[in-house]
Image: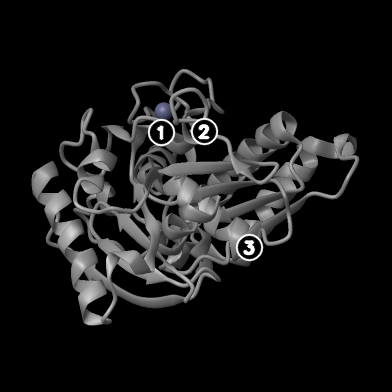
Amino acid sequence: MEKFLCGVDLGGTKLSVGLIHPDGRIFDKVIVFDHVGKSELQVVDLISSLIRQLLNKNGLSESDLKGIGIGFPGHLRYKEGITLTSSNLKGFKNFPLRENIGKNFHVPVLLDNDANAQAFFDFKFGAGRGYDSLIFLTISTGIGAGIILDNKLYRGITGTAGEFGHTIVETSGDAPLCTCGNRGCLMACACGLSLPYHFKKKTEQGLKTTLPLPKDFDYSQVDGQLIMKGFEMNDPVSTAIFNDCADYIGIGIYNIFQVFNPPIIVLGGGLMCWGEPYLSRIKSKFYLLARDMIFDKIEIVESEAKCDAGLIGAAALLLE
Ligand SMILES: [Zn+2]
């Protein structure tokens, strides 16, 4: 019998554990939210017991698993399996997560960054099928990425390669402050977290929103959905933000193109729900910058990831 891949997608709000067929189909999965706020060791126990529950429920045992792949939302030391930092989860500083899960099982355990796992999903089963290299960018609350070169994830010396979110794309004095402490990072300019900043700034510059907002509107409430709504009703503030965000991503992928010359760049994450006008604007900016420097076709496409991409991608790391 073919062995199942066990995937664990450890998110800031959601923890998913699943048994995945080697062709990427989900056999069974369980999702919980009560890992938030727990200690590292409690999270280890929770993940381990969820894996056992899934096995027992389906009359399976550990020997039916090829291994366990875990996607983690933050920086990690890949070779050592140690988590370094996470902006989405409490704790997990210098925590040997791989070893602690491994103690409870007798199969290989892999630990990688969640954006790498999502990149691997598109590479194996999604928009990047058939390519031997791709760059994946997730544009969401933050911005992360995965780099696949010649069929292998490129992780860098530590395991933190692909942090395109912290590449600097704006150097004006009042460029937005990033969570890393620098100004003008791609994610400070163009991810979900940046939207309240842009809204306040555009308004202060004299643009008037036509969105029906309360008088005491709290700018921190500005999110992707509000900007999309404003864009659809031709609100000048929302439209300007929508366009700026797309242009910054266009600059970001232009930089990626110049560094890697990849055959395909896959864009995923929550802000991709801005749809076709967003992707078109990103591409326009990219082609404007790349002009006559493109010698072979480059695809810029939307990820095929649905909500389980992190889970399936984590499991698929066992196929690398
Ligand atoms: Zn940054």
Name the residue type under label 2.
Answer: Arg
Q: Are marks 2 and 1 in contact (CB under 8 Å)?
A: yes
Cα distance between the residues tagged 1 and 3: 37 Å
Sequence-first disc among 2 and 3: 2
Residue 67 in the image: state x and y as whole percent. 38, 56
Mark 3, residue position: 277
Which quarter of the picture shows residue 285? top right
Q: At numbered mark 1, what does the secondary structure look like: helix, strand or loop?
A: loop
Cα distance between the residues tagged 2 and 3: 32 Å
Name the residue type under label 3.
Answer: Pro
Which quarter of the picture shows residue 187? top left
**Local crowd size for mark 2, using a 10 Å CA cut-off: few (<14), some (14–19), many (≥20):** some
| Residue furthest bottom as drawn | 58
**Local crowd size for mark 1, using a 10 Å CA cut-off: few (<14), some (14–19), many (≥20):** many
Residue 74 in the image: state x and y as whole percent. 34, 39
Q: Are marks 2 and 3 in contact (CB under 8 Å)?
A: no
Q: Residue at x 66, y 58 (%)?
A: 128
Residue 168 showing in the rendered view = yes
Judging depth in this view, the residue of 114 and 180 nearest the camera is 114
Which quarter of the picture shows residue 97? top left
Mark 1, residue position: 78
Q: Quadrant of ligand 1?
A: top left
Residue 69 in the image: state x and y as whole percent. 38, 53
- Which numbered circle lies on residue 113? none
Sequence-first disc among 1 and 3: 1
Q: Is residue 282 left or right of residue 45?
A: right
Judging depth in this view, the residue of 320 and 71 nearest the camera is 320
- Which numbered circle lies on residue 155? 2
